[in-house]
Image: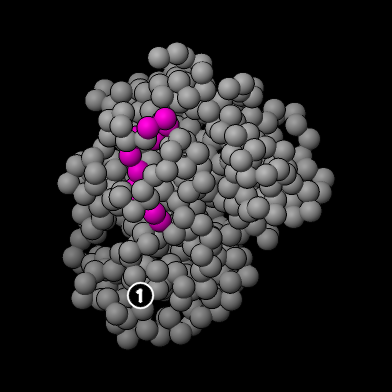
Amino acid sequence: MPLPEVYSHPSPRLTLLPHLLPLLPYTLPLVRRIQFHFQSPHAHILSTLAPDTPPPHSPPTTTAPPPFAALYLDRSRAPETECWLFSTLELPASMQPTSPPQNETNALSHLLALLTHIPHLPLPPSYPPTQPPSRLLLGAIHRSVLQALAGSPFAPDAGKKVISGPRAAESAHGEWRGTDASPGGCVRGHTVPYQKFLFRPATIARAAGEDEAGDAVLESLGLEWTTVREGEFELVASRTEIPRSGRTMRLLGSVGLRRRGGGSRVGATAREEGGGGGSAEDGQLVAWAFLGPDGSLTSLHVEVEFRGKGLAKLVTRRLFGLLARRERESGFVGVREGEEWCQSDVATDNAGSTGVARGLGGEEGWECFWGWVDLGEAERMSGVREG
């Protein structure tokens, strides 16, 4: 199929965000990834929109945008999520310019244009030697995009929670599936569906007014606000199946609760705290959460003996408040008033986290997945390479 041109956006906050921000919340994962405070020298921001494309003049609710796709790629993050993307295929029917079959065909051409461009980019020196360059781990993929790349009906519930990292083989259907995983497509494995919960700026602002009641709960439990210290990353990693390296956690904004007796500045990244282990006299860390590189709630955890006391909601609300107040400790820059959407990806079988999200006013947005894509198969789908 004929593919659109692919353009690099070395200054995406100037050239790409003006096209993505009017489409919030549908573009939220990619918007936040671009706004994350640390941009790797190995990152590439690509789009089928040229950097000099004029931003839209009409509200997106009245004028459908032209088909396009965009992605953030950083292969130095492997084996963690390497790529986040957005396609206009993700927009609701009211914002689509044509009929569904034509929408999917147009959107697929834009997606394949981006994916077939990736093999032409240099690999970073840190790229894992055990992972073939043709394998790409996509994060927070909208169901419609995964379906288009699969090339045939797929079983969303056949996946597992983890498909990458050292625990993938025991926790998932494996790190990589053979060529029969997606006949006619380039998907080679995916997670279970995750429900994208969206938190409107006004919802987060209202929740911040409940901090006084939360402080009373913490006082009764002998807990105080803190941040996660670098010496506690091993503890955090041991409490989750999701692979998350120390180098990543060091960059993320976090909020925690520990037994009273030696805290840290709330909301600071571990690097700003200067490391240091959480010794017994400093106070035991009992609950924590981070804002991931795409702005989603990640690694939310409460130790067993402190569960059932509402601490998960308190930590989440406090963490979202950093972003809602546009504080630099959130880990994001350039978030403007009215754009402080927050998000959480919850496995559809996780009743506890679903309850936390709904209890904080979260609205169900769409289902998303993490998935392996075979870049060689993407070339074959597009006709770039015969085989």
383 horizontally vs 48: left or right: left
Asked if the magenta segment contains residue 132, the reply would be: no
Residue under the point 24% across and 47% down: 172
Residue under the point 38% across and 41% down: 371
Which residues are drawn in magenta?
183-194
Q: Nearer the viewer, residue 318 or 269?
A: 318
Q: Which residue matches tag 1?
A: 311
Pick the quarter of the image with the C terminus.
Answer: top left
Q: Position of residue 2 (x, y in %)?
A: 62, 21
Dot 1, how many residues are within 10 Å of its Cα: few (below 14), some (14-19), or many (20+)? Answer: many
Secondary structure of the residue carrying tag 1 is helix
Q: Position of residue 94 (x, y in %)?
A: 70, 54
- Color theme of the render: one colour
Q: Position of residue 330 (x, y in %)?
A: 50, 55
Task: Identify whether 263 is placed above or below 231.
Answer: below
Residue under the point 32% across and 35% down: 181
